[in-house]
Image (tube, helix red, strand yellow):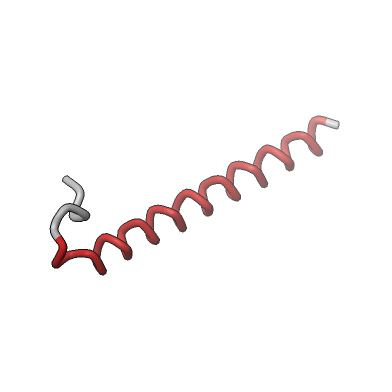
Amino acid sequence: MSTCISVESVPSCQWELLNIGISVILLVGFYTSNFCSLLVGGL
């Protein structure tokens, strides 16, 4: 289902990858902050 195959849709593919990267970074940051707060709360 990826749009990266077609040459015409390269910009949209790059935007798609950028959005995925941002989402992953936000998720990792969210879970890391939650994990740290759990550790601090546990101590």
Q: How many marks?
A: 0
Q: Residue 7 location in percent, x, y?
A: 16, 63
Classify residue 19 by image quadrant: bottom left
Q: Residue furthest top?
A: 42
Residue at image position (14%, 67%) is 8
As rendered, which of 37 and 32 lies closer to the eye?
32
- Taking the image as shown, residue 3 lies to the left or right of residue 40, namely left
Residue 39 lies, in percent from the top left, at: 77, 34
Q: Quadrant of the N terminus?
A: top left
x 17%, y 52%: residue: 5
Q: Residue drawn 39% across and 61% down? A: 18
Image quadrant in which the C terminus is located? top right
Please provide percent x and percent y for residue 15.
Answer: 32, 65
Q: Is residue 43 left or right of residue 15?
A: right
Q: Is residue 14 above or below residue 25?
A: below
In the image, taking residue 38 as reference, residue 21 lies left or right, namely: left
Outermost residue on the front side: it is 7
Q: Is residue 10 left or right of residue 23?
A: left
